[in-house]
Image (cartoon, rainbow, N blue to C red):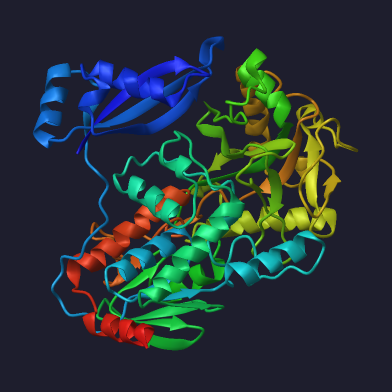
Amino acid sequence: MSILVGNIRLPLGAADAEALEAAAKKCGLSMRELCGAHIYRASIDARRGKITRVLSVLLDLAETQREEAVVARVGKNDVRLKKPAQQPVPTGTAHMEHRPIVVGLGPGGLFAAYVLAKNGYCPRVFERGQSMESRDRAVTAFFSGGAFDPASNIQFGEGGAGAYSDGKLTTRINDPMSEWVLRTFVEHGAPEEILYKAKPHIGTDILKRVVCSMREEIIRLGGEVYFGCTLTGVRSRNGVLTAAVIDGQEIACDRLILAIGHSARDTFEHLLHSGVYLEPKPFSVGARIEHLQEDLNASLYGKLAGHPALPPAEYTLSHRENGRACYSFCMCPGGQVVAAQSEPHAIVTNGMSYHARDGRNANAAIVVSVNPSDFPTSDALGGVAFQREIERRAFQLTGGYRAPCQTVGDFVAGKPSRKHGRVAPTYPIGVQYTSLGSVLPDFVLAHMQIGLRQFGRKIRGFDAPDALLTAPETRTSSPVRMTRLDNRHSRQIAGLIPCGEGAGYAGGIMSAAVDGIGCAQEILQTFRPLEERRDEVCSKQRQ
């Protein structure tokens, strides 16, 4: 146990040692009385025209009882006890007849498989896309003008959609396992700064290596990982799971963690035919907006823009009017807009940053909430049909994989664009200047215009005429939810455990990873580890 001391405010250039001393003083302690102290969280407060560092500090004393006494004596809300994050441990006693199966190797499936492997359950993992190495080659070739690969792209493959993103690790779920996720990332090559930064991110360049390292650990501990293998159904008897169907072949299993991601549309159809209950779910659509990063820095940091202690500026914006929200999503400082389709003859945009965030432009999605009542059909896949219509309309408009693009000035004026201004597009395949009114629904356009005006009042220059919009952004979250019970099992099929973004229970790397841990925990709590299988693997490794 440690003492967590929050709300330590220091000037921008202050050293971390000053924060440690300030935390000790706040608790009435001297540094000599501590057996350890380190920064737990660090952020920048740029509000009200003054920039300060805001830190939380962990203090360790030799005795837990004394730590409890210090917290009681101080009696402040920003001084409390902090328990260390713990990895889930197995507690079940039932015998598992077949090895657990994990479908999907995005954040949810990756952490589910990792926890199972670490605790001796030797999972079998099936991913429809390719390994990171093969996937990277396919994505690079497509971005360079090559053929689109529907089996290996930004949506499908090892690491999931998050492997080509900003690698943002912020979350609103406030789950104690979030810290364990961060520490696991660091163990596999992520920078230690993610443990204390208030807005941690890895970047796609580092995240790819972390994912590969975790996969190798799963295999080392007795798990098996298969690429190019698609779930085409499940089998059940009397409401209980009996097998997964992988490319038409039945594989017997007692538990199947279903972490397929938000874009596995054909798998959604297979699951419906297998009797799995899916329901349509709200999500959002819009476009990516790009600004010059230096302009954004100047708007948010003022005269301190360019200070070496300041990170590239980022933002979170939202506005609600007439029952709909318009908001920023997946903001990528110093990043680029990328091609994120998972089907041929369609266009989808997303954003990505490397760890350095040193690109010329900043980008984010500006999206508007859509509801099942907006979908063309009322069935479970009505949201998929809504997405497809927009994505295919964009492809037909440009006659290929170039993305529709419009300056904010022309967008607000309601006229097509002919060229860009100071902000040049970063979409790798090329853009076609046009009107987004030919792609996005009227209500989305109207609320985006309202949102841009509001956001321009919050951040100077946000609605500048030469800011750039590239469309469409349609994959903000899953268009379906696979309803599950309190024990995380599917409502219809016991033993089937929907997980992560594709199941409608997460939104982002961290929440999907934590959900994956929770799904693995259900197996740990029910069954004992597969000792014989683990011993067999260890014996082979020794040989």
Q: In this view, does 88 lie to the left or right of 368?
A: left
Quadrant of the image for the N terminus? Answer: top left
Q: Position of residue 56 (x, y in %)?
A: 35, 27
Q: Can residue 376 be seen in this view?
A: no
Name the residue rendered at 63%, 42% in the picture.
356
Farthest right residue?
418
Q: In this view, does 440 lie to the left or right of 316?
A: right
Farthest front residue?
32
Front residue (pair 511, 320): 511
**Rendered image quadrant of residue 152:** bottom right
Q: Where is residue 178 in the image (x, y as percent from the top left)?
A: 35, 46
Q: Position of residue 528 (x, y in %)?
A: 18, 74
Name the residue rendered at 45%, 35% in the picture.
197
Q: Is residue 75 visible?
A: yes
Number of dots carrying numbers: 0
Q: In this view, does 14 lie to the left or right of 447?
A: left
Name the residue rendered at 84%, 33% in the picture.
415
Question: With respect to residue 336, does 140 lie above or below?
Answer: below
Quadrant of the image for the C terminus? Answer: bottom left
Question: With respect to residue 470, does 137 lie above or below?
Answer: below
Q: Where is residue 126 in the image (x, y as percent from the top left)?
A: 47, 75
Name the residue rendered at 49%, 51% in the picture.
190
Question: With respect to residue 339, does 175 lie above or below?
Answer: above
Q: Is residue 203 left or right of residue 424?
A: left
Question: With respect to residue 202, does 410 lie above or below?
Answer: above
